Image (spheres, helix red, strand yellow):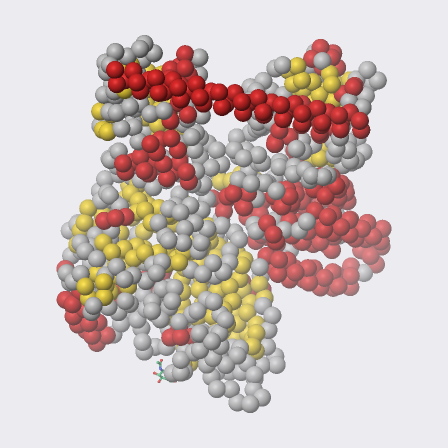
């Protein structure tokens, strides 16, 4: 793609332009060289929010033409070496010559990262751009090829097409942490290097995008053939680079010398007036501007923005009106008219997949041909391929430890855990959704001074090895407070003072394996001889006694409160419900299940057995796996609460067993198993469309009740097809609601995330925030709906890759063929209208922004209508088809088109 960018879009200035620019740059460079102050301006007078790094430069300088201060990269990276390109290539890139003169190369290490800390912090929109100009800096005349990551994710592959070509990919990035890493990855095809790195904050409202990340923007403008330079800051407040698009086939440039009134408009995209002042229109006699990106392959996914401004003086009564259509009608706009000199930007919050093309067509009522002033195309990285960054507290702590302890390990770069392939040596991470650092081995690292306090922030640590260093000072108290620490090795150091009592205690009671090695100067539990140390110890003892007393009092108050609360709850429950028969002994459980004879399932929390109660009713007994003992504290209270939730679309809990280690939940028996099984490819007994809609309505009923019928509302937290069960009449009921909150989950497969919820069903916002709410259930429900509609699982495996159902279904929906959306096993035995309606409802559940998702009550109403639509047609269907197949297809297509445009509106 980079090649394409260069070959098509990098301007080839006429010789005189080069000469003028060379002279200009020479002068400017002479002026700026070595100046700390320039024209009375301090160099750190930088543009607010901009981070501008001239990699490999020896000092900071002011770039005259843009007014941007470029910093050397000293404060942003601590690896790599400075280089200068070969002198013959100094000026091969006039627009950014100075920037590309120096570079930093990374002969060592697989991953080398710049660390950017933008002032605006996380969850903001940033434009990130890097420059790469090889310029034969190493006299090898061999262009390397390597990857660049932003944060923990792949951004682009750098492979300039010629020694003197610069490439400058950019991307729009919304970081989830305050630190942004830009990493160069050695992929074995040459030494990575970088010439410059820039970060620009963008307004938060710009480039709204719900589907992952925007990588690599191509920004074309300008119907002009004269001025070829790139347009950037200050013309562009956001410092986007706009390339001249004069090579576009037969588009005719038009221009107007007046300045376009940008300030006066409310177009927050603020395209530069140089960009808007010129435009393209079709050749005379034509009414459409056509654009076709030849080289975009089948897998190309993009996002697109159009920028317009009326620059011609229109004679009274004449109007210009046009329609944008992308990828042959996948998206079609409403008719657009422009206000004179007022910019209008249109970004489509939609992914276009495959061969990219668009056309801008004059409407029939238009007197003039369409115009286009500029447009932008961005590549898209689907969210499903994105890794997650390490917990930001752990990142901050380990970065600080690295810095204060001057740990020089070449691989300690960028995110510590993610992606797995490049995680730091000497530490291991949990495989949670948000990885945590769980072990740290700093043995023999030549650490000096005291144990760094930042270690206390690595709260997930299980294992810490600081042995064989020159650590001195006291062994700090906080080591005993690391809540999960199981192994601590401090041997081979030079500590003095005493070992904290709490550590010794932990070691004695076996909760911590503590190695102190041969401690000469340390006092263990035996009283110290040195007076000073004795005093210290006495102080510690006093402090310990005092804290213990306080803790005891607090515990007492807590217990009293808890008992009081429990009593009240028990009273409330008992007065309303008969709980006597709902608690079972373990021996009863054994009898009910006939000594656990028949396994009918295995899910989160443990195996499920068939059971028969005294009165012959069949039940499902879920024996909670013993390996997840922790987290059962609230078992009884929670089980009792769940037993009072009754609804015909919720699987009822008929009892529970709580006898020490043996814990079980006893549910009503659901003869037809779970929905996942029914939708799977191995199931030969296909659930028909009508049944599917009925199941959707049932499940929606159940979920709606949990959300709106229970006070306080119950969030399911892990809705998925395997948690929707069917009874002997194929009536659907939701199972496992409210469980994940009460119990430590032992998930049923590795695709599950650390947070409750299952990958594929978990919405992007909750993934990011770790919080679950009603709207995250709605998202999961939307995924279930799509599975019902398409017959495909939430995550499909294809060519060694996982594909999320939304990534599969969006392009198919855009194609507008309902037949290819709906499960082919139904052999088109469904009604188009109800199918489109179901798709529409599912779409309303899955926007990545929670507030845009429907409420369950709304979803329920819509689904009922959808079912009614299907039923109504079911009755007359045969007749219609027999009588006049052709005529009936016309209104059908129309209504499906209407629905489609509604869907397009939703996608936007
Ligand atoms: C504007 O267009 C005229 C012809 O229509 C052309 O001669 C002129 O060079 C253009 N100016 C710019 C700045 O492109
Ligand atoms: C910790 O690091 C040291 C030195 O690098 C190494 O000898 C030791 O085996 C490591 N320990 C573990 C458990 O990996
Ligand atoms: C430190 O102690 C732990 C536990 O005794 C042990 O597993 C580990 O190998 C030790 N590390 C070194 C470098 O001896």
Taking the spot 25% from the left edge, 21% from the top edge, the residue there is 495
Q: Is residue 133 left or right of residue 850?
A: left
Q: Looking at the image, which residue sits at the far bottom?
A: 316
* Quadrant showing the C terminus: bottom right
**Which quadrant of the figure has residue 402?**
top left
35 in relation to 213, above or below: below
Percent of width and height locating residue 477: 36, 24
Percent of width and height locating residue 706: 71, 39
- Please state the total of marks drawn on the protein image: 0
* Quadrant showing the N terminus: bottom left
Q: Is residue 511 left or right of residue 724?
A: left
Taking the spot 41% from the left edge, 20% from the top edge, the residue there is 544
Taking the spot 57% from the left edge, 34% from the top edge, the residue there is 756
**Which quadrant of the figure has residue 131?**
bottom left
Q: Is residue 473 visible?
A: yes
In this view, the residue in front, 836 or 699, is: 699
Q: Is residue 414 left or right of residue 284?
A: left
466 in relation to 383, above or below: above
Taking the spot 60% from the left edge, 20% from the top edge, the residue there is 625
Q: Is residue 688 visible?
A: no
In this view, the residue in front, 599 or 262, is: 262
**Which quadrant of the figure has residue 687?**
top right
Percent of width and height locating residue 506: 42, 16
In this view, the residue in front, 130 or 462, is: 462
Q: Is residue 544 left or right of residue 361?
A: left
């Amino acid at each position: 793609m980079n090649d394409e960018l260069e070959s098509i879009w990098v301007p080839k200035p006429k010789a005189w332009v080069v000469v003028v620019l060379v002279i200009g740059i020479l002068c400017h460079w002479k002026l700026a060289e070595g100046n700390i102050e320039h024209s009375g301006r301090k160099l750190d007078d930088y543009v607010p929010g901009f981070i501008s790094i001239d990699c490999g430069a020896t000092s900071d300088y002011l770039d005259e033409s843009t007014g941007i201060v470029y910093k050397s990269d000293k404060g942003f990276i601590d690896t790599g070496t400075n280089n200068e390109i070969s002198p013959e290539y100094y000026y091969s890139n006039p627009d950014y010559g100075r920037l590309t003169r120096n570079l930093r190369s990374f002969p060592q290490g697989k991953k080398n990262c710049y660390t950017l800390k933008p002032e605006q912090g996380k969850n903001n929109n940033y434009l990130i751009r890097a420059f790469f100009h090889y310029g034969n800096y190493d006299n090898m005349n061999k262009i390397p090829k390597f990857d660049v990551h932003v944060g923990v994710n792949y951004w682009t592959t750098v492979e300039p097409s010629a020694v003197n070509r610069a490439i400058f990919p950019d991307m729009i990035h919304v970081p989830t942490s305050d630190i942004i890493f830009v990493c160069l990855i050695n992929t074995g095809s040459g030494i990575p290097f970088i010439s410059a790195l820039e970060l620009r904050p963008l307004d938060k409202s710009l480039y709204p995008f719900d589907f992952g990340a925007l990588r690599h923007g191509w920004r074309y403008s300008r119907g002009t053939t004269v001025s070829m330079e790139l347009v950037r800051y200050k013309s562009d407040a956001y410092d986007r680079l706009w390339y001249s698009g004069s090579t576009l086939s037969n588009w005719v440039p038009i221009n107007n010398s007046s300045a376009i009134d940008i300030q006066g408009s409310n177009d927050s995209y603020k395209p530069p007036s140089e960009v808007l002042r010129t435009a393209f229109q079709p050749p005379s006699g034509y009414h459409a501007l056509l654009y076709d990106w030849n080289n975009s392959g089948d897998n190309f996914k993009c996002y697109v923005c159009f920028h317009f401004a009326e620059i011609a003086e229109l004679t009274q009564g004449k109007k210009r009106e046009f329609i944008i259509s992308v990828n042959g009608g996948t998206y079609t706009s409403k008719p657009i008219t422009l206000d004179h000199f007022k910019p209008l930007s249109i970004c489509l919050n939609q992914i276009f997949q495959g061969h990219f093309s668009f056309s801008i067509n004059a409407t029939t009522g238009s007197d003039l041909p369409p115009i286009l002033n500029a447009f932008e195309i961005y590549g898209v990285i689907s969210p499903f391929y994105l890794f997650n960054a390490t917990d930001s507290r752990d990142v901050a702590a380990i970065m600080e430890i690295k810095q204060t302890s001057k740990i020089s390990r070449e691989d300690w770069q960028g995110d510590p855990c993610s992606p797995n392939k490049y995680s730091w040596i000497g530490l291991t991470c949990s495989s949670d959704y948000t990885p945590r650092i769980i072990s740290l081995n700093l043995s023999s690292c030549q650490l000096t001074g005291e144990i760094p306090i930042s270690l206390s922030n690595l709260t997930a640590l299980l294992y810490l090895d600081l042995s064989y260093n020159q650590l001195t000072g006291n062994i700090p108290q906080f080591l005993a407070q690391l809540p999960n620490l199981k192994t601590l090795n401090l041997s081979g150091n030079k500590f003095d003072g005493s070992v904290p009592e709490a550590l010794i205690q932990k070691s004695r009671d076996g909760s911590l394996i503590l190695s102190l090695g041969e401690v000469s100067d340390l006092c263990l539990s035996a009283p110290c001889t040195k007076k000073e140390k004795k005093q210290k110890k006495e102080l510690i003892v006093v402090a310990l006694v005092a804290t213990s007393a306080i803790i005891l009092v607090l515990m007492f108050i807590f217990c009293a409160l808890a008992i009081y609360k429990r009593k009240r709850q028990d009273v409330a429950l008992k007065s309303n419900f008969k709980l006597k028969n709902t608690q079972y002994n373990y021996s009863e459980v054994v009898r009910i299940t006939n000594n656990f004879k028949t396994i009918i399932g295995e899910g989160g929390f443990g195996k499920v057995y068939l059971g028969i109660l005294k009165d012959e009713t069949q039940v499902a007994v879920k024996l909670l796996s013993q390996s997840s003992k922790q987290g059962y504290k609230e078992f009884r209270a929670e089980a009792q609460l769940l037993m009072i939730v009754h609804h015909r679309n919720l699987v009822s809990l008929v009892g529970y067993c709580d006898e020490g280690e043996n814990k079980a939940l006893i549910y009503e028996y659901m003869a037809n198993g779970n929905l996942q099984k029914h939708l799977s490819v191995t199931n030969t007994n296909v659930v028909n469309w009508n049944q599917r809609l009925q199941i959707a309505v049932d499940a929606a009923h159940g979920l709606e009740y949990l959300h709106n019928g229970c006070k306080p509302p119950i969030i399911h937290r892990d809705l998925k097809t395997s948690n929707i069960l069917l009874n002997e009449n194929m009536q659907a009921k939701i199972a496992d609601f409210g469980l994940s909150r009460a119990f430590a989950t032992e998930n049923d497969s590795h695709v599950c995330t650390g947070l409750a919820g299952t990958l594929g069903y978990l919405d992007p916002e909750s993934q990011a925030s770790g919080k679950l709410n009603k709207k995250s259930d709605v998202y999961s429900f939307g995924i279930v709906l799509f599975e019902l509609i398409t017959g495909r699982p939430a995550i499909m495996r294809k060519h060694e890759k996982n594909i999320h159902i939304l990534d599969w279904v969006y392009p198919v929906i855009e194609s507008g063929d309902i037949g290819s959306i709906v499960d082919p096993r139904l052999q088109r035995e469904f009604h188009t209208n109800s199918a489109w309606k179901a798709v529409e409802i599912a779409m309303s559940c899955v926007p990545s922004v929670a507030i845009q998702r429907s409420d369950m009550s709304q979803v329920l109403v819509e689904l009922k209508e959808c079912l009614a639509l299907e039923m109504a047609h079911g009755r007359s269907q045969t007749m219609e088809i027999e009588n006049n197949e052709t005529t009936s297809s016309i209104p059908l297509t129309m209504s499906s088109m209407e629905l489609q445009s509604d869907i397009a509106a939703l996608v936007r």
